[in-house]
Amino acid sequence: MKNFISNVTVFSLLSFTMISANALGMSRNIGELANYSKVDEVILLPEIGGNLSGITYNYDTGTYFMVQNNYGKLFEYDRSLKKQLRVIEMKNLKDDDTEGIFYLGRDRFAISSEDNHIHIFTIRPGDTVLDLNSAREDVQDFTLPPPSKKNKGLEGVCLAPSKNGGRGTFYTVQEASPKKVYTFEFPASDADVTSPKVLGVKELFNADKALFLKMSDLSDCTFDTESDHLFLLSHESSKVMEFSRTGEEIGSLKLPTVAPQYEGITFGPDRELILVSEPNSVVIMKKNH
C-alpha cells in the first residue's frame, strides 16, 4: 500500500508539473525542432563578401538561392552549398535592402525588403539580371504597413500552401520596434496591391507579447510543408521557434555559437536545417540519428 501511495503521489506531481507548464505557456519541444541538436558542417562563402541575409531551397532545380542585403544581389549555389552557379543582379528595386527570400515553385520567388515591401518575380534558367520595376507585368509588389523605425522593417517572407484551393498564405516578419508576424492570403490576381487593408494584412499574434524573453528580434521565417509548421528565426537570441499555421507555439531550438549572426533559414531536400549568417557563412544541421 505504501508503494502504491508513493507511485500515485509521483504521478500526481508529474501531472501537476505538466499542467502548470502548459498553463504558463512553457513549450515542450515535441515538434520538428526536437530532431536537431548538433551542427554537421559550417561552410564559409568568401566570394559573397558580406551581408548574407536569406536562403531558400529550389526543389525544382535542386539548388539554393541566397539574397544579400544592401547590394541587390542574389546567388545560386549547388546542392552541396559549396559551388556558386551564378550571381543575379536585381535592378529597379524600391529598396535594395533585401532581407528574405522564399521559393514559391515554377521558377517564382518572393523577396522581402526593409521598407516593408514584398516582390514576386520569376528567375529563369540563365538569368543574371532581373528588372524588378513594379510596373512590369511579370513583377508583383505587395505593400505592408510601414515600419515604425528605420532599418527595423521586414526581414523574412514565406508561403504556406493553400488547403482550400487558393494560392496560399503568406507569413512575413518585421524585425523589431515592435516585432511583428504578419499574414495575408496570396491574392488571386497578379496585380500589385499597394494597400495593406486591401491585401488583408493582419498579425498572426502579438509578437512583442508572445515572444517576450524568448526572441528579442526576428530575422527570418520559413514554412515547412512536411510538418505544416511555421519557423521563426532570431539572430539576437540565436534561436529558432516552431509554430502551427495559426500561431500556437510548438517548440524551440537554441542555435550553436558557430556563427556570429543568424539571418536566414530554410530546410534542405534531406530535411537538413540550413541557416545563413552574416557576413558569409552557412550552417548545416542534420536530423539526429
Image (cartoon, helix red, strand yellow):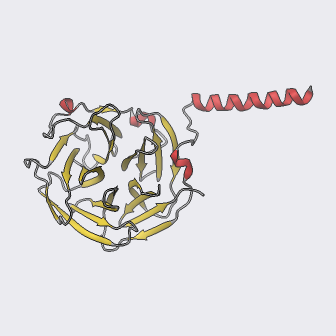
Residue 246 falls in which quadrant of the image?
top left
Which residue sits furthest right?
1
How far across and down, in percent of the image, does residue 57 sit? 35, 57
- Tell me: residue 8, above or below residue 79: above
Quadrant housing the N terminus? top right
The residue lying at 38 percent from left, 72 percent from top is: 82
Q: Nearer the viewer, residue 24 or 39?
A: 39
How far across and down, in percent of the image, does residue 151 sit? 26, 50
The residue lying at 23 percent from left, 55 percent from top is: 97
- Tell me: residue 129, above or below residue 17: below
How far across and down, in percent of the image, does residue 65 sit? 30, 60
Does residue 70 appear to the left or right of 233 in the view shown?
left
Does residue 121 appear to the left or right of 284 in the view shown?
left
The residue lying at 54 percent from left, 32 percent from top is: 25
Residue 67 falls in which quadrant of the image?
bottom left
How far across and down, in percent of the image, does residue 5 sit? 86, 26
